Image (cartoon, grey):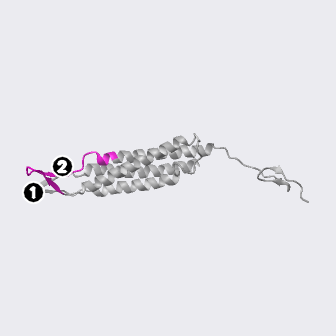
Amino acid sequence: MKGKVIAMCGIVVVLGIISAGAGFVAEVTRVKLSDVRIEHLSCVYPSSPALGLGIVAAVFAIITRIVLLILVGCCCCCRPRGSTSTAIPIIFDILSWIASVVAMILLFGGAALNNREGEQTDSQGRISCYAVKPGIFATGAVLLLLSAIFGIVAYVLLSSVKQMAPQLEFALPVAANVDPEKNIPLPPQQ
């Protein structure tokens, strides 16, 4: 069982690093306002791989989320209510979900805004161009790392709880006159 836990954690770590790495590279390669030129009263944007990298980061985040969903399961269902041994893993699973969702919103939003071309003219005739604010992709990448870490912690805690749970085995009586559900002798049949 321990080898399976380590292998699954390794898969989540690799997927988390790939998605966060793509997010950090998207941050570095995003279109900055200083890169935009104004020619003939319109903004000219350079090409940037940030759109593709932001989408790759979000796709790997979705894959990581699917793997964690398979490993940890649903945070609220299929768990005994009131059990304090599963409360902490559930909290980490919820934190992992929140970090994933916010990271994907930032990455998809940053990718869409990075590819947005256009300008706005104010009342005095000055042209202003669009650019993604610094830190959007980096924040998404950090949240992806946190999501993977929280998911791993939830998985490890849940697997340790399952290992510590006592294995109850019942020996059913072999006698013909014993009710197996209630474990009491049945009245003799005539």
Q: Quote the CA–CA distance across marks 1 and 2.
A: 16 Å
Kindly identify the amino acid type of the residue bearing the numbered disc 1.
Leu
Q: Is residue 18 above or below residue 153?
A: below
Kindly identify the amino acid type of the residue bearing the numbered disc 2.
Leu
Q: Secondary structure at mark 1?
A: loop
Magenta part of the chain:
118-139
| Label 2 Cα neighbours within 10 Å, binned few <14 / some 14-19 / many ≥20 | some
Pick the front one: 71 or 112: 112
Q: Position of residue 127 (x, y in %)?
A: 12, 52
Residue 50 located within the stretch drawn in magenta: no
- Identify the residue position indicated by label 1 in the image: 41
Residue 127 located within the stretch drawn in magenta: yes
- Identify the residue position indicated by label 2 in the image: 33
Pick the front one: 45 or 25: 45
Residue occupying image coordinates x 33% and y 50%: 106
Residue occupying image coordinates x 35% and y 54%: 57
Q: Secondary structure at mark 2?
A: helix
